[in-house]
Image (cartoon, rainbow, N blue to C red):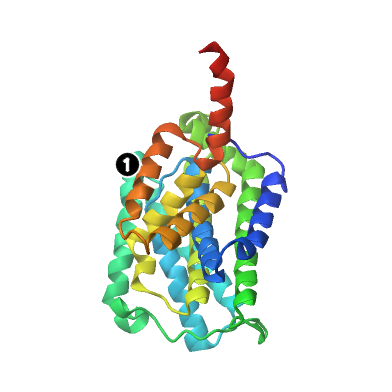
Amino acid sequence: MTNASPRFPNGTTVAIGAILVALPWVLPSLTLASEILVVATGALSCTLLLGSVGLLSFGQGLYFGLGAYVSAILIRDFGMNASVAALAASVAGCLLAAAAGLLIVRRQGVYFVMLTLAFAQMGFFLALAFPKLTGGENGLGNVPRTTIAFGQFALSNPRLLYAFLALLCFTAFAVVQRIIASPFGSVLNSIRHNESRSEALGYDVRRFKFAAVTIAGGIAALAGAMNTLMLSFVPLSAVDVETSERLLIASLIGGVGSPLGALVGASVLSAMSDFISPVWPRWSMIVALLLIVIVLFLRDGLLGLGNVLRSHRKEAPNG
């Protein structure tokens, strides 16, 4: 697994910014470009946990759904603008992740994974249990296209909507990169490599894990708010376990060794869904095969493909 550069900003920061600017021009629709931003931001929360701390979470869809519902309710029922709604959703995600983190960071390995899955399932059934608040199976509709801030810049303009989502996405990536480049990020990386040694050095491992889980929850909730702004609607699937799986798969496909992997994985997964699903309804089989190949042969995801090819070229003359 590749480690991120200790400097920030760096080449990865430039690459992320360039990709976000280029997406509307190279893709056939702004809808697909906006979808990639949403998935990439959500996948980034998985990348932070797995790539920086070594924590595998199947529960990020819980915070994604919470962010979607919170932003929708604030916009529809309280007339909040998009900036306030997105910020509030992210804060709500941090608070819920902190509450869940008090319990789940006490466990390791498969027990940690199962607890994240249990919380995600609990969130789904709670959304079903309170249809007056969440819309239940019908989803939460009638979310108007609001403005970015102070009644200015209406998001009914598709290009302005994409620009705002891109700004939120880039901010999330910049925050994660800054965390990775900080002393706090160095401790997280130490925990990922050798938790026992980190604890022996005097670090409160649970506290660092708790902080990482909390931040990741806020990022996933921000992605949920972005999804609401894009759709003007919150489907029940926003809080489904399948959403957690999709975010995790996107991060694995791109590679959890770098934040850029979340954007690459989201682009590949969203593009496959958009281009292949109309032709072949069972397109997810291709995703499953791709994931198997990556797990077996490309532990750094698609971002590590270049390193694998270079290593084979160096070994070829000796073969």
* Vertical relation: 283 (above or below) 190: below
Residue 128 position in % (x across, y down): 28, 74
Q: Position of residue 49 (x, y in %)?
A: 49, 47
Q: Secondary structure at mark 1?
A: helix
> Which residue is painted at 49% across and 70% down in the image?
227
Question: Can residue 49 be seen by looking at this rendering?
Answer: no
Crowding at dot 1, Cα within 10 Å, few <14 / some 14-19 / many 20+, comes out as few
Q: Is residue 11 left or right of residue 55?
A: right
Q: Position of residue 105 (x, y in %)?
A: 41, 47
21 sits left or right of 301 in the view: right
Left or right position of 197 against 244: right
From the viewer's side, name the closer residue of 182 and 301.
301
Q: Is residue 165 above or below residue 270?
A: below
Asked whether the viewer can see residue 132, the reply is yes
* Residue 96 found in image quarter: bottom left
Across and down, in percent, residue 91 comes to 53, 67
Which residue is tagged 1? 110
Name the residue furthest top.
Answer: 318
Q: Give the residue type at disc 1.
A: Val
Which residue occupies the foreground of this view, 257 or 123? 257
Q: Residue at x 44, y 44 (%)?
A: 55
159 relative position to 247: left or right: right
Depth order, front residue of 285/242: 285
* Residue lying farthest to the front in this orientation: 279
Q: Nearer the viewer, residue 177 or 159?
A: 159
Q: How many marks?
A: 1
> What residue appears at the point 45 percent right and 45 percent down from the top-left corner?
252
Residue 236 quadrant: bottom left
